[in-house]
Image: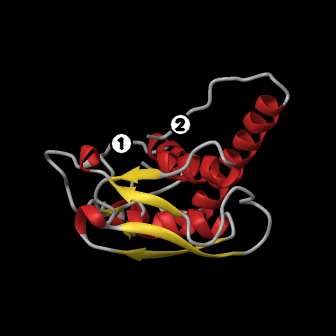
Amino acid sequence: MTRKITRGLANIAIGLEQCLYMGNIDSLRDWGHAKDYVRMQWMMLQQDTPEDFVIATGMQYSVREFINWTARELGLTLEFTGEGLDEVATVIAIDGDKAPAVKPGDVIMRIDPRYFRPAEVDTLLGDPTKAKEKLGWEPEITAQDMCAEMVADDLKAARRSALLDEHGLSVPVALED
Protein backbone atom coordinates (compact mmCIF):
# COMPACT_ATOMS: atom_id res chain seq x y z
CA MET A 1 0.00 0.00 0.00
CA THR A 2 2.86 2.41 0.73
CA ARG A 3 4.28 1.98 -2.77
CA LYS A 4 0.82 2.45 -4.27
CA ILE A 5 0.56 5.80 -2.48
CA THR A 6 4.04 7.13 -3.28
CA ARG A 7 4.01 5.94 -6.89
CA GLY A 8 0.45 7.11 -7.47
CA LEU A 9 0.96 10.61 -6.08
CA ALA A 10 4.32 10.98 -7.87
CA ASN A 11 2.60 10.01 -11.13
CA ILE A 12 -0.15 12.55 -10.44
CA ALA A 13 2.43 15.25 -9.67
CA ILE A 14 4.02 14.72 -13.10
CA GLY A 15 0.74 14.28 -14.99
CA LEU A 16 0.87 10.54 -15.68
CA GLU A 17 -2.27 9.87 -13.60
CA GLN A 18 -5.22 11.95 -12.42
CA CYS A 19 -6.29 10.38 -9.14
CA LEU A 20 -5.25 7.87 -6.49
CA TYR A 21 -7.98 5.43 -5.44
CA MET A 22 -7.83 4.02 -1.93
CA GLY A 23 -9.83 1.87 0.47
CA ASN A 24 -9.75 2.34 4.24
CA ILE A 25 -7.42 5.28 4.84
CA ASP A 26 -8.10 5.25 8.57
CA SER A 27 -6.54 1.81 9.09
CA LEU A 28 -3.43 1.86 11.25
CA ARG A 29 -0.17 0.18 10.29
CA ASP A 30 3.26 -0.47 11.77
CA TRP A 31 5.59 0.49 8.90
CA GLY A 32 9.30 0.00 9.03
CA HIS A 33 12.25 0.15 6.68
CA ALA A 34 13.73 -3.03 5.21
CA LYS A 35 17.23 -1.88 6.21
CA ASP A 36 16.19 -1.87 9.88
CA TYR A 37 14.47 -5.24 9.54
CA VAL A 38 17.43 -6.89 7.82
CA ARG A 39 19.75 -5.51 10.50
CA MET A 40 17.47 -7.04 13.13
CA GLN A 41 17.48 -10.38 11.29
CA TRP A 42 21.28 -10.32 11.22
CA MET A 43 21.31 -9.63 14.97
CA MET A 44 18.96 -12.58 15.52
CA LEU A 45 21.31 -14.85 13.57
CA GLN A 46 24.24 -13.87 15.81
CA GLN A 47 22.57 -15.45 18.86
CA ASP A 48 23.98 -18.72 20.21
CA THR A 49 20.47 -20.11 20.70
CA PRO A 50 17.71 -19.62 18.14
CA GLU A 51 14.72 -17.64 19.40
CA ASP A 52 11.65 -16.00 17.96
CA PHE A 53 11.51 -12.21 17.78
CA VAL A 54 8.86 -9.84 16.50
CA ILE A 55 10.22 -7.66 13.73
CA ALA A 56 8.29 -4.41 13.97
CA THR A 57 8.79 -0.77 14.94
CA GLY A 58 6.17 -0.68 17.67
CA MET A 59 4.85 2.57 16.18
CA GLN A 60 1.59 2.98 14.33
CA TYR A 61 0.38 5.45 11.70
CA SER A 62 -2.75 5.73 9.60
CA VAL A 63 -2.86 5.35 5.84
CA ARG A 64 -4.19 8.93 5.79
CA GLU A 65 -1.00 10.11 7.54
CA PHE A 66 1.12 8.29 4.95
CA ILE A 67 -0.84 10.02 2.17
CA ASN A 68 -0.19 13.38 3.84
CA TRP A 69 3.53 12.66 4.26
CA THR A 70 3.75 11.73 0.58
CA ALA A 71 1.90 14.87 -0.49
CA ARG A 72 4.17 17.05 1.65
CA GLU A 73 7.25 15.49 0.03
CA LEU A 74 5.79 16.61 -3.29
CA GLY A 75 5.10 20.11 -1.95
CA LEU A 76 1.35 19.54 -1.71
CA THR A 77 -0.99 20.41 1.14
CA LEU A 78 -4.16 18.33 1.15
CA GLU A 79 -7.57 18.78 2.68
CA PHE A 80 -9.71 15.72 3.30
CA THR A 81 -13.45 16.29 2.97
CA GLY A 82 -16.52 14.09 2.85
CA GLU A 83 -17.13 10.86 4.68
CA GLY A 84 -16.99 7.19 3.88
CA LEU A 85 -17.10 6.45 0.16
CA ASP A 86 -17.52 10.18 -0.56
CA GLU A 87 -14.24 11.20 1.07
CA VAL A 88 -11.71 12.94 -1.18
CA ALA A 89 -8.36 14.68 -0.79
CA THR A 90 -8.12 18.05 -2.50
CA VAL A 91 -4.96 20.06 -3.08
CA ILE A 92 -5.24 23.35 -1.19
CA ALA A 93 -1.66 24.61 -1.57
CA ILE A 94 1.49 23.90 -3.56
CA ASP A 95 5.03 24.69 -2.48
CA GLY A 96 7.92 24.19 -4.87
CA ASP A 97 8.11 22.67 -8.32
CA LYS A 98 7.84 18.93 -7.71
CA ALA A 99 4.21 18.75 -8.86
CA PRO A 100 3.94 20.74 -12.10
CA ALA A 101 0.80 18.92 -13.26
CA VAL A 102 -1.19 19.73 -10.11
CA LYS A 103 -3.07 22.87 -9.18
CA PRO A 104 -5.02 23.96 -6.11
CA GLY A 105 -8.53 22.55 -6.19
CA ASP A 106 -7.51 19.28 -7.85
CA VAL A 107 -9.00 16.18 -6.24
CA ILE A 108 -6.12 13.73 -6.21
CA MET A 109 -7.45 10.96 -3.93
CA ARG A 110 -10.83 9.27 -3.82
CA ILE A 111 -12.19 6.34 -1.87
CA ASP A 112 -13.13 3.33 -3.98
CA PRO A 113 -15.05 0.39 -2.49
CA ARG A 114 -13.02 -2.03 -4.66
CA TYR A 115 -10.10 -1.43 -2.32
CA PHE A 116 -11.83 -2.40 0.91
CA ARG A 117 -10.60 -5.82 1.95
CA PRO A 118 -13.27 -8.33 2.98
CA ALA A 119 -11.26 -9.27 6.07
CA GLU A 120 -9.88 -5.78 6.73
CA VAL A 121 -7.73 -5.46 9.81
CA ASP A 122 -8.12 -1.92 11.15
CA THR A 123 -4.97 -1.96 13.23
CA LEU A 124 -1.63 -3.75 12.87
CA LEU A 125 1.02 -3.16 15.50
CA GLY A 126 4.01 -5.29 16.41
CA ASP A 127 5.72 -5.40 19.80
CA PRO A 128 9.52 -5.43 19.36
CA THR A 129 10.21 -5.22 23.11
CA LYS A 130 12.09 -8.54 23.23
CA ALA A 131 14.35 -7.52 20.32
CA LYS A 132 15.05 -4.18 21.95
CA GLU A 133 15.84 -5.72 25.34
CA LYS A 134 17.71 -8.85 24.25
CA LEU A 135 19.40 -7.67 21.06
CA GLY A 136 19.64 -3.93 21.69
CA TRP A 137 17.84 -3.35 18.38
CA GLU A 138 16.13 -0.05 17.70
CA PRO A 139 14.72 1.08 14.35
CA GLU A 140 16.92 3.85 12.94
CA ILE A 141 14.78 4.94 9.98
CA THR A 142 11.45 6.57 10.75
CA ALA A 143 8.33 5.86 8.73
CA GLN A 144 8.45 9.49 7.57
CA ASP A 145 12.05 9.10 6.36
CA MET A 146 11.11 5.87 4.60
CA CYS A 147 8.24 7.70 2.90
CA ALA A 148 10.56 10.50 1.77
CA GLU A 149 12.99 7.96 0.30
CA MET A 150 10.16 6.22 -1.57
CA VAL A 151 8.72 9.49 -2.91
CA ALA A 152 12.13 10.62 -4.19
CA ASP A 153 12.57 7.34 -6.07
CA ASP A 154 9.03 7.31 -7.47
CA LEU A 155 9.20 10.97 -8.51
CA LYS A 156 12.45 10.25 -10.35
CA ALA A 157 10.79 7.31 -12.17
CA ALA A 158 7.70 9.40 -13.03
CA ARG A 159 9.86 12.19 -14.44
CA ARG A 160 11.83 9.70 -16.51
CA SER A 161 8.63 8.16 -17.90
CA ALA A 162 7.18 11.58 -18.74
CA LEU A 163 10.41 12.64 -20.47
CA LEU A 164 10.56 9.47 -22.54
CA ASP A 165 6.91 9.83 -23.47
CA GLU A 166 7.45 13.48 -24.44
CA HIS A 167 10.14 12.34 -26.89
CA GLY A 168 8.04 9.60 -28.46
CA LEU A 169 9.61 6.77 -26.50
CA SER A 170 6.56 5.64 -24.65
CA VAL A 171 7.25 2.98 -22.05
CA PRO A 172 4.81 1.21 -19.77
CA VAL A 173 4.24 3.15 -16.55
CA ALA A 174 3.26 1.40 -13.33
CA LEU A 175 -0.13 2.99 -12.69
CA GLU A 176 -1.97 2.72 -9.42
CA ASP A 177 -5.64 2.36 -10.20
**Extreme-front residue of the structure:** 105
- Residue drawn 81% across and 36% down? 163
The reply, left or right, for residue 144 in relation to residue 116 is: right
The colour mode here is secondary structure
The reply, left or right, for residue 146 in relation to residue 50 is: right
- Residue drawn 62% across and 46% down? 11
In depth, the one of 43 and 127 nearer the eye is: 127
In this view, the mark in front (2 or 1): 2
Q: Which mark is residue 49?
A: 1
> Tag 1: residue type?
Thr
Is residue 13 among what the camera can see?
yes
Find residue 47 and report its horizontal and vertical position in percent: 44, 45
Q: Earlier in the sequence, mark 2 or mark 1?
A: 1
Q: Which mark is residue 175?
A: 2
Examine the rendered structure and indicate whether residue 166 appears above or below residue 170: below
- Residue drawn 58% across and 59% down? 147
Find residue 174 and report its horizontal and vertical position in percent: 56, 33
Question: Which image quadrant for residue 91?
Answer: bottom right
Decide: few, some or many residues near mark 2? Use Cα within 10 Å; few <14, some 14-19, many ≥20. few
> Tag 2: residue type?
Leu
Is residue 123 among what the camera can see?
no
Label 1, secondary structure: give it: loop
Find residue 121 and report its horizontal and vertical position in percent: 20, 55
Examine the rendered structure and indicate whether residue 174 appears above or below residue 125: above
